[in-house]
Image: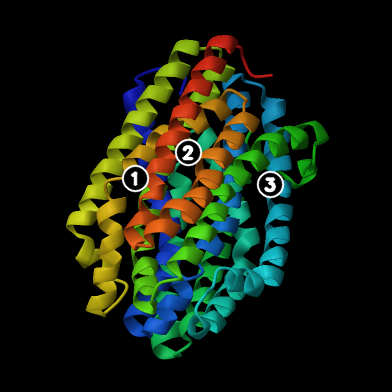
Amino acid sequence: MVDGSLFKGIMLLSLPLVLSNVLQVLFNMADVAVVGRFGSAEALGSVGSTTTLVTLYTGFLIGLGVGINIITAQFLGAKRDKDVSQTVHTSFLLALITGVLIWLITFVTSKPMLMLLNTKDDLLDGAVLYVSIYAIGMPAMAVFNCGNGILSADGDTKSPLTYLTVAGVLNVLLNLLFVITFNMSVAGVAIASVISQYLSAILVTAKLFRVKNACRMSIGNMHICLPKAKKILSLGLTTGFQYSVFAIANLFIQASVNSFDTVTVEGNAAAANTDILIYDIMGAFYTACASFMGQNHGAGKKDRVKKSYYVSTLYSFLAGLIFGVGLVILGREFLSLFTKEPAVVEAGMRRQYIMGFSYCISAFMDCTIAASRSMGKSLVPTVIVILGSCVFRVVWVYTVFAYFHTIESLYLLYAFSWTITAGAEIIYFFKIFKKQNGVIAR
């Protein structure tokens, strides 16, 4: 990561990450597709209505993994093996504890939260059932994202991809078995996801016990190092919170969507799978940006730090543009994977037309946030995100959307909030880059 072509290196690191992230998306996407095609419209709406709430908690765990990735990469770049080992073991235990806590929180709060979102009465029971079961997989998801962050920081993105491939295939097979053969509908797809998540967590944990360098885990070293825990929590929790902020803002958006008829809600649920798919494809480049910048920052190579940011942002922008427009062109075919009802497909296309041309804007925001965090700064980027992508969206809901009350006026808030947040994040990043001038990790 600290030598050679950045265009080639970032792309080679990102491609397995793209596939890994897509496979993670397939856990929930397969749930929606199977219940939509082989279940009922109500089952589709029930599972789809949980997307925002599930993202609230899973996004936090993904963000925690990103924070772990950055810290590990910094110490690897600085060749501080003892610090790497302490970070790996502390991260694993903290991730496991965090996953268990989120599981318990989700189980207790799922129904009140779904009611707060104005989930339709005919969808509520199914949505609560899905979230309650799905939450059992949170500890496994936390462990996998921790392991993925550590291995990616070391340049190994192929192993997590392999494990997710195996788990993803199992997830689809179990979905079909539980829904078609046993007629378990919502409960069946949730159970299938949980089993698959634990398989991926077991596989990535086994890999960490087998690696040959400082990232190797061992039972004898399995303890929490308080100084490393403080550093991990400082960056990891703020990163996780940033991911959750989007979901918090989206709670208000989901509540607004729920103010429309059931067909619109179901169409939005089907089309929202596009969001998750493209976000995670673009997210691979954010992780690559953090890994490359973290290692080069640790090695004191300031020119490669800045170039890593430029290359990652370019790749992410192009990914958002190409896949976004592609899913507009093939939108009806894509939505038909999740529903058999033409009216629901057309409702989903109203979302596709706007979002397909908006995703690429988020590259400038998210890559810049990853860049700032790789420089050791997490608080200010999080505050900017809260203001630009949470507060702004809530204000939009109660002003612009309240005035027009059309589904299009609701979807447009994404592009506007990304643009405002990206501008502020870019200004902050170049300010701290100039100030630090390549100071190595401490």
Q: Residue 348 appears in which quarter of the rendering?
A: bottom left
Q: Secondary structure at mark 3?
A: helix
Dot 1 or dot 3, earlier in sequence: 3
Dot 3 or dot 2, earlier in sequence: 3
Amino acid at the residue labelled 2: Asp
Per the model, the C-alpha gap separating discs 1 and 3 is 32 Å
Residue with the most extreme bottom position: 182
Per the model, the C-alpha gap separating discs 1 and 2 is 27 Å
Q: Residue at x 48, y 59 (%)?
A: 253
Q: Is residue 231 left or right of residue 345?
A: right
Q: Is residue 147 left or right of residue 309?
A: right
Q: Which mark is residue 359?
A: 1
Dot 1 or dot 2, earlier in sequence: 2
In the image, 260 versus 224, the foreground residue is 260
Q: Secondary structure at mark 2?
A: loop
Amino acid at the residue labelled 1: Tyr
Amino acid at the residue labelled 3: Phe
The image shows residue 55 at horizontal and vertical percentages of 53, 58
Disc 3: CA contacts within 10 A as few (<14), some (14-19) or many (>=20): many
Q: Which mark is residue 280?
A: none
Per the model, the C-alpha gap separating discs 3 and 2 is 17 Å
Q: Give the residue pinned by disc 2.
A: 156
Disc 2: CA contacts within 10 A as few (<14), some (14-19) or many (>=20): some
Q: Give the residue pinned by disc 3.
A: 92
Q: Residue at x 38, y 76 (%)?
A: 261
Disc 1: CA contacts within 10 A as few (<14), some (14-19) or many (>=20): many
Q: Secondary structure at mark 1?
A: helix
The image shows residue 93 at horizontal and vertical percentages of 73, 48
Q: Is residue 100 above or below residue 2?
A: below
Q: Image quadrant for the C terminus?
A: top right
